[in-house]
Amino acid sequence: METYNQHIELINNYLNNVLSDDAKSDFKDKLQSDIAFNTLYEEHIVFLKGLDRIQIKSDIQKGKRSYHTEKWLKISGVSILFIGVFMMLYTLISNASENNPTSNNEVLNPIVLDSATTQKPTINKVLDISEDKVIKNESNIEEYDATIINKTYKSITATPGSPKKEAQIIRVNTQKDTSITCKEGTILKIKKGSFINPNTKKIATGTIDLKITEYYKLSDILMANLSTVSYGKLLETGGMIYIEVLQNETVLELKENSDIEISFSTKNKKSNMQLFYGQWTGRNINWELQNDVLEELNISEEIIEVPFAVIEQVPTFPGCEAEGNESRKKCTSDAISKFISRNFNTDIGLGLGLSGRQRINCIFKIDQDGNIIFIQSRATHPRLSEEANRVVALLPKMIPGMQRGKSVVVPYSLPLLFTIEGKSNATRQFGNSVVNDTISMANLIFNRPVEMDTVYKNSRGIIETIREVMHDKYFVVDTLFIQEWNQYKKQRLIREIDGSNFRRFILRKTLFEMKDSKFKILEDDSITRGGHVIRIPWNETKIPTTTQILNLVPKQRYSAGTETVTAEEFEDRLGSQANENISSRDVSYYVLKTSNLGWINCDRFINGRTKRIKYKLKIKNAEEASINMVFKSLNTILPSWYTNGVYDFQTVPKDEDIVLVAIKRKNGKLYFDTIETQTKVNPQMDFNFKEVTIDELKKELEIFNNLNN
Amino acid sequence: MSDQNILALFKNGQPDKAFKKLYHLYPKIEKLILSKGGSKADASDVFQEALIILNRNLEASNFKLTSSFYTYLYSVSRFVWSDLQKSLSKRQLQELNTEEVQIFQNVIEEKKYQLAEHAFSEIGKRCQYLLQLFYHKAMSFNDIANVMQFKSSKIAKNQKYKCLQKAKDIYQTKLKLV
């Protein structure tokens, strides 16, 4: 990077001819000898020429415009002459009535006026507010109201010669900040030195004239042929103003990065009013939303997925922030394997009547914020893949992976292997690390999963500890409190003492004296020493037997295009707008995941069922819909893999009753169809998509829950 | 207005006025493009491209206009259009004379610059502004920092390199796509 900068600087100096002769010849030698430098030089030249084009283009545009203006002026000059002659003849010849010629005059006057005064040829047309346009405007009066204009744009100066409202002219000193109240109540606040002379590019000094026209009344707006449309969308207007700033007949421009504050006078204020500026296109004015563009240095690049194996900077497991990509990569994959192996409940494997080597294929993605999303796993039994999903979802937030300096989504696949041997011994192997342990056949506690927004690992984790220390089993522990708790621990306001057969917490007095303290002293079971409170956690006997051990899992997140969102946010996004980012696959993943149907793995069919076939679907009108197979007998879903226009379900049992469920999202709308059929070789079918809402879609899927009941 | 006068306008640094004069030739070029199946918008683009190439050549020291502006622009436009349509056959290419080869090369080169320009147009307004101040207006980093309200000239400098790098990245990816 540093050398790159130096090179560029050197090239610039060379091109600007500020190098000494020696340096020049050095430079030329370098061009000859250093290939990389040479390509950099060539590239820079190309880039500079590209930059030049912009300058040349603007010159050409200028030339073109003045050419057109000249041409147009000539044509209009000739036509005016012609009309003039024609009118003279007409008035001379027609003696029939004296009124007619005058009315004709009225119509024609604007033409003459127009062509004589307007500099820009692009718009000039005879002003005609055609009958139907007026009517249309009026029918929409209720709906619009609020649009505003800021900035003096040259294009507006070329307003067609409309029956203009008379402008107010206010003289202002540019050396002072000024506040102006106009006739109809608009207040302008202008900072000193806000205007520049476009010809000299210098800040205008001295006095300037502001020409302000206010359009509040509907009649004024209509008369000026101002419509309130932004790219075809109707706007409500809260008033429009037209400002022109003049100094000695030169139109001034607003300086870059400075602005005029405009307060519009409105009787009934409405929220969500935004500032638009107007630009004439043809006969109508188009209002463009004025955005504050300060963040433009970030260009958004397509979100790409980069596999873990090849990414420049791997996503990093917290605690693996070691130097070097390779060591980070190893540390992270080890940490993930270790984490999964520690948290995976192998007990689940025992009750399922499985034996031998078990393989669970787990795929998930680490998104740009380091969240774990899109978890999918395939196992020999749905319960196993459920457990795998649960554990993967527990993974902590990672430091996202980077490619070319931008965080990207990184897919990660993880095969989980373990062997179920007999009933008391299981060997687990996850990735690289092998863990041997004996599974105690103690009572399996049914851990109810509860969605939280943070990860807690143990069934008896920090929440339970806090509740114990607080001596309050209903104590509300949220993420914030856990952060505070850890903070206090760091500050030694809370100390944990682990003895051989006891555990104690010392809470410092300060905690109880703090404002809004959540810490309270309960009379009966606290001992104070030196003003501090010593708490002994509940012992086994005190733990209420009715306590339900909650299994805290992070909120399931779904991918909606480039972002990951919670279930509520997902539906919000679906409903609120045509969010193009959300693909059919996202939707079907979301809906199926939130339905009660289990997922099934095609490997499962390898054991047991008799005849197996490969099932591939080719569908004409699929348009990248997401298609899944629901087995009536099993209540499970088999996802398909979509490649090259073919939906591949891999191996399935033959003559099985299935329902093919297709979900499609197109232009912000959801479509859905199902086909009931049996699995057979070379299936032929077409879907007949119907538009549905997300709720309808969910209802449709609920039906499958009861298929075999 | 004679070609000499137009040439003088170019030399005096009034290219916009020169272009205005040259636009008198536009209707003829438009006819050419229309006759080859292009639209009016195509014609306008082609003519603009021809003017850019002309301007670039006039700036180069070793270039001499051997024919009239009209002849030159006509042949450049023809090449720009056939290149756009990819309609030149190998045989046609072989039959070109030296002058035409020169023009054809210019057209091909200009395409590269066009890519660079597109890359430039995609880097965001502030980046564009910054690079323009530096390269077109030849402002110092100090002045740029003042105008663009950067905290120091160093930041402006840094920002400029970033912008440049970004533009070049985009250019490279575009180049690969072509």
Image: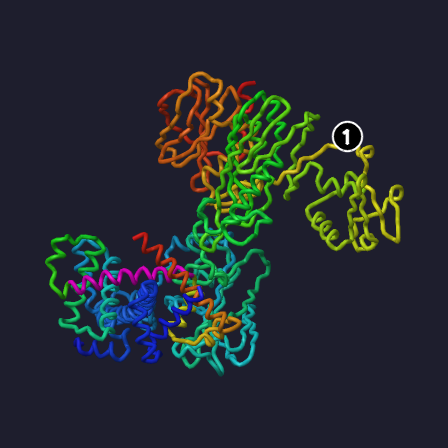
The amino acid pointed to by label 1 is: Thr
Numbered range of the magenta stretch: B101-123
Q: Choose between B75 and B116: the one closer to the eye.
A: B116
Seen from the viewer's position, the closer of residues A363 and A635 is A363
**Residue A87, horizontal then vertical, whole percent:** 24, 69
Residue at 54% x, 69% y is A261
| Looking at the image, residue A472 lies above or below residue B47 | above
Query: Does the magenta segment cover residue A618?
Result: no
Q: Nearer the viewer, residue B15 or A96?
A: B15
Residue B116 in magenta stretch: yes
Q: Secondary structure at mark 1?
A: loop
The answer to whether A460 is drawn above or below residue A534 in the figure is above
Q: Which residue is mark 1?
A: A546
Residue A123 in sight: no
- Regarding residue B137, the answer to whether it shows in the image is yes
Give how far across and how far down residue B152 sits, in percent: 51, 73
- Up-down: is A353 above or below A227? above
| Residue A519 at x, y percent in the picture | 80, 48
Residue in the image at 45% along x and 57% along y: A299
**Subunit under mark 1:** A
Residue placed most toward the observer, A117 or B108: B108
**Which residue is farthest bottom?**
A206
Question: Which quadrant holds residue A127?
Answer: bottom left
Residue A262 in the figure: left or right of residue B4: right
Figure check: A505 above or below A225: above
Majority secondary structure of the magenta segment?
A: helix
A144 to the left or right of A100: right
